[in-house]
Image: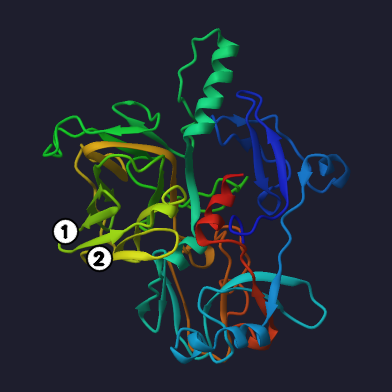
Amino acid sequence: MEPILRGPRFLWTCKDCSFQNSFAMDTCKSHQPFQCGACNKLDPQSNVDFNDATSIAEKTILGAQVKFESLRKIHASRTIEIAKGQAQSSGLARGDVVVFEESIGSLREIKRIVGFPMEQIAIDRGDILVDDVKWSKSLEQSLRQAILVHAWDGAALIAQAKVAEQKSGGTANRGAASRSTGGWSYGGLPFTGLLRASGGQGASMASAAELTFDSPIPPFLDNRLAVNAHDSHAIVHVKDFGFAFQPKHFQGDWGIRCRFWCEANESQVELRWSGASLAIQGEKESVNVEINPRNEKALWIIVAMIDDFLVVGDQDEEWMRIALPESEAGMQRIPPVARTVPIAIGALSGELSLDQLLVFRDIHYRGQGDSSSQTWLPSPGVVVLGDNVSMSSDSRDRWLEGLRPNAIRGVVLQQGSPMETLLRQRY
């Protein structure tokens, strides 16, 4: 269930750049070289025998403890959701992370429940279909299972730059950061925290400066997972991703335009801040959101493409949801030469100073044997899948006719808000 739930990790330090990698233990294979997540260099000398517990003990750290609530208590706490049809009569809801025992006395396992008895469940090019209808998640559900792709922290970069300057005698490039998982650049240079419009209040997009997120494999984001030491997956492009930003302050007016590109869709939305109000303008819809001044400092603004919708909101609620144009099945949309990045943020007016920026993506499901599709016909069982798709042993290769519902012991209690679930993946 990495990276949503943190399991045991193996620490390995790259000889070339001294970066300490933290790999999920269940993705490590004996006598296979590691590739550094910071400099991307492969170390052929990194020969580790993971069957030798003594030699790896001092480089292994324990995973996080998991707490779960019994089904009886879950049922009692979800009476409203059950009445609205948002949860099953048992109290379980699609997307719950559940603890189960395959048989009496067997080890307990943790997976995400995606299908209930007598439903036809399918994986189709990364999506989950329920009775031939795509599972469309709320912003909260998406954040609860989102995978962090990149974290930009202005304060951390300044601190790192100061240390680098001291070591190099003041010649280090302030704001430089690893590009192994992509990186933000502004005018061709590493982003340092300030978005400023190059023209006046009515500046056109052509004259506006753009902050861009550069993918490790341009021009699209892919399904790799940084905690996997030896990933078995074919690398494919993903279409459900987004970013979240935390303004440093709310002094002065500003306006930005956010643009997304993937193989299946492209979309854009404008955000304009004035006073205590945020105006959101989609291609065909608009909405104004009043922001409580007391919550400004902790506010995260989130813009994402989720299950063929463009969604805008904060860590507590959705503000706008716009249906994206449908694409033909299997369509490969290659962007024009100028569009070489999946995310671009243009400064339309004023100045926007940022504290933090996160890029995240949804789980991109693959079928058995890394196929792009798989189907479970209606049965009395449930379908459970792991979040670390390339390494998980789940309903794709076990319980092909469904896991017994009475094998489920409870629902994992995820601590904190959906945004905190995502932020914990930085460490």
Describe residue 234's horizontal placement relative to residue 26 as left or right. Answer: left
Q: x%, y% of residue 267? A: 23, 54
Q: x%, y% of residue 215? A: 39, 40
Identify the residue at the far right of this view.
54
Secondary structure of the residue carrying numbered label 2: strand
Q: Is residue 86 above or below residue 112?
A: below
Q: Is residue 274 above or below residue 387?
A: above
Residue 87 in view: yes
Q: Which residue occupies 24% across, 40% down?
A: 346
> How many other residues sit within 10 Å of disc 1, few (<14), some (14-19) or many (≥20)?
few
Q: x%, y% of residue 339? A: 23, 41
Identify the residue at the far top of this view.
169
Instruction: Give me the C-alpha separation between circle 1 and circle 2.
Output: 9 Å
Residue at image mark 1 = 283
Q: Which residue occupies 61% across, 58% down?
A: 391
Question: What's the amino acid at mark 2?
Answer: Ile
Residue 237 in view: no
- Please report contact status of discs 1 and 2: CB closer than 8 Å, yes or no: yes
Secondary structure of the residue carrying numbered label 1: loop
Q: Nearer the viewer, residue 333 or 234?
A: 333
Q: x%, y% of residue 145? A: 51, 62
Which quadrant holds the C terminus? Answer: top right
Question: What's the amino acid at mark 1?
Answer: Glu
Q: Quadrant of residue 251?
A: top left
Q: Quadrant of residue 31?
A: top right
The disc at residue 322 is: 2
Describe residue 280's horizontal placement relative to residue 145 as left or right. Answer: left
Q: Which residue occupies 61% across, 57% down?
A: 2
Which quadrant holds the N terminus? Answer: bottom right
Q: Which of the colour schemes (rainbow, by chain, secondary structure, one colour) is used? A: rainbow
